[in-house]
Amino acid sequence: MNFWDFLGFVFWSYIFISYLMVLFWIIGDLFRNRGMNGWLKAVWLICLLFVPFLTALVYLVVCGRGMSERQSASVQRSLDESESYIRSVAGSSPVDEIAKAKALLDSGAINQGEFDAMKVRVLSGQHHPTAV
């Protein structure tokens, strides 16, 4: 095998792997698309099976904008869910915990010594959201 054979092999391998990635991206988008009915999805899949390159090209031209919008919405939804989860497990800030402890002190639920102990614990970094 000479250099040009190797270069051709690398080039065609790159093309084939790129095509497979596009093919799986299209199939994933077909099943994610709620605006398309089942029969039309089946037609797209059959066309991808029998005329793969042409069908992939046509799908990208016809549905490319919708693909990017669905992908963008999916990414945004994942980010929102991640941020929501992080906020739910992160608890409150030390300032919030001290304010809650102060409200407990003002209402008479705890005494000054307990308030001071909570304040020291929160300021030392050993606070726990359920402790206050």
Image (cartoon, grey):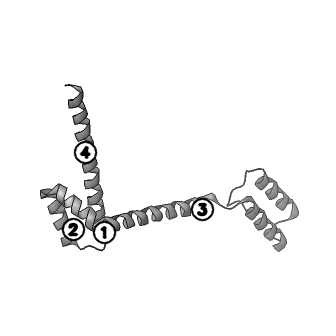
How far apart marks 1 and 3 lie (CA) works out to 30 Å
Element type at mark 4? helix
Question: 15 and 83: which one is in front?
Answer: 15
Q: Are marks 1 and 2 in contact (CB under 8 Å)?
A: yes
Amino acid beneath label 1: Asn
Circle 4 residue: 15
Q: Judge depth for marks 3 and 4 and give the one in front.
A: 4
Q: Residues within 10 Å of mark 1 (few under 14, many from 20)?
A: few
Question: 54 and 31: which one is in front?
Answer: 54
Which quarter of the rendering shows the C terminus?
A: bottom right
Which residue: 73% across, 51% down? 126
Amino acid beneath label 4: Ile
Circle 2 residue: 41
How far apart marks 1 and 4 lie (CA) works out to 27 Å
Q: Earlier in the sequence, mark 4 or mark 2?
A: 4
Which residue: 55% across, 64% down? 84
Circle 1 residue: 33
Which quarter of the rendering shows the N terminus?
A: top left
The numbered dot on residue 87 is: 3
Q: Position of residue 38 (x, y in %)?
A: 21, 71
Q: Are marks 3 and 4 in contact (CB under 8 Å)?
A: no
The numbered dot on residue 131 is: none
Q: Earlier in the sequence, mark 1 or mark 2?
A: 1
Element type at mark 1? loop
- Is residue 109 in view from this perspective? no
Q: Earlier in the sequence, mark 1 or mark 4?
A: 4
